Image: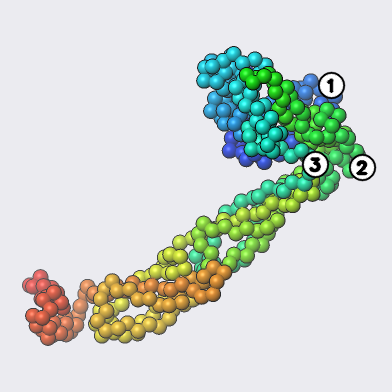
Amino acid sequence: MADKRDYYEVLGVNKTASDDEIKSAYRKLAKKYHPDLNPGDKAAEASFKEINEAYEVLSDKDKRAKYDQFGHAAFDPSAAGGYGAGGFGGFSGFSGGGGFAGAFDGFGDILNSMFGGGFGGGTRSANPNAPMRGDDLRYNLTIAFDEAAFGVKKEIQFRREENCSACSGTGAKPGSKTSTCTKCKGTGQIRVQQNTMFGSMMSTRPCDACGGSGKIIEQPCESCKGSGRTSKVVKLNVTIPAGIDDGQTIVVGGQGGSGYNGGPSGDLLVTIRVKDHKQFIREGFNLYTNLSIPVTTAVLGGEVKVPTLSGDVKYTIPAGTQSGTTFRLKELGIQRLKQQGKGDLYVNVTVDIPKHLTEQQRELFEKLAETFGTEHPEGLGSIFKRKKTKKK
């Protein structure tokens, strides 16, 4: 087993590749190295067999999980305790290849045919040329805080797979013909007999002659190399609605990968990332900010300017306001997403105590402190008496 290449490497995909990515890679390679397109080429024939072997494992959820955990040893008859033909957890001796895992694959196919799916590895489409929906694509878009609050239009650029314009997605050179695969009779699948612990059973797998397409392409399209698909960079304007929050996703219908065999395109899922604001914090549709006011305004009350996302507004601070007091300004928060109205703005007030006083200011504060007498021992009187004592 040491000379075997990694199955992910064979198909040219990452270990995190989705089922659709694995399927797409397999189709491209199967068409490229198909024996009918490379007559007498032993290297192409060997590559074709290797590709099919890799796809057989990676396209099956259970087999892929075993392969990810144990590598090729999972299907090595000589590996003690293996999970393939060599046994299951040390229980070996199954004949005919497939072993315990293969037995359940075949058993699952029987149950699928009886009860309509849901057992073993699941069912595949009976018609490989039936319309199939394209892949959904994901895109992360970072926007400014104000853009999220008021809404914005952004041009994004991304890459997606589309049907080849030269061959209309058939994979065949314009003007050439395709023929029905004689091995699978156009179904894209072949049935394989397996000898298992339950007896002789039948299972299905993609046809190794046509790569599961059901067709043989005699002359591949020069533009897409017979894959029927091309990768294209697309520019698209996306409308971001006012009030969207960090982590929310916009679905742009029909802008994903093109469908197969005339099927509908997938969607583009745009996930929004919102930058922090230097002054405001958002919670839901409400905004929070801090505001420093003079001690005189806190004591006597007065009008101040409060910052909002739309500019400063005037607000009257009541007399006797304490540091740490929070005021609620209604409807000055974030626009509610796809709704009427806005959230509120909460302003936390901090009283600015002067650190440096002129002699005149000090005298005035000391006279003010005397008027409080002993009624407010922790008020202005005690504060400025302590400062006077320290000065001496």
Tell me: 53 left or right of 370: right
Q: Which disc, if any, is residue 175?
A: 2
Q: Amino acid at mark 2?
A: Gly
Are circles 2 and 1 on residues that touch, CB within 8 Å? no
In which quarter of the view is residue 347 placed? bottom left
Query: Can see residue 15?
Result: yes
Q: Position of residue 214 (x, y in %)?
A: 81, 35
Q: Amino acid at mark 3?
A: Asn
Q: Which disc, if any, is residue 40?
A: 1
Q: Amino acid at mark 1?
A: Gly
Tell me how far mark 2 sits from mark 3, CA to CA.
20 Å
Q: Secondary structure at mark 2?
A: loop
Q: Compared with residue 284, is residue 316 higher up or lower down, i.e. above or below? A: below
- Which residue is more in the foreground, 57 or 193? 193
* Quadrant position of the N terminus in the picture: top right
Q: Secondary structure at mark 1?
A: loop
Query: Can see residue 141?
Result: no
Q: Secondary structure at mark 3?
A: loop
Tell me how far mark 1 sits from mark 3, CA to CA.
29 Å
- Which residue is more in the foreground, 138 or 381? 138
Q: Tell me what residue is drawn at x 77 percent, y 25 percent.
A: 44
Q: Residue furthest right?
A: 175
Of mark 2 and mark 3, the one earlier in the sequence is 3
Of mark 2 and mark 1, the one earlier in the sequence is 1
| Residue position marked by numbered label 3 in the rendering | 129
Q: Position of residue 336 (x, y in %)?
A: 52, 70
Tell me how far mark 2 sits from mark 1, CA to CA.
26 Å
- Which residue is more in the foreground, 143 or 80? 80
Q: Which disc, if any, is residue 208?
A: none
In which quarter of the view is residue 222 placed? top right
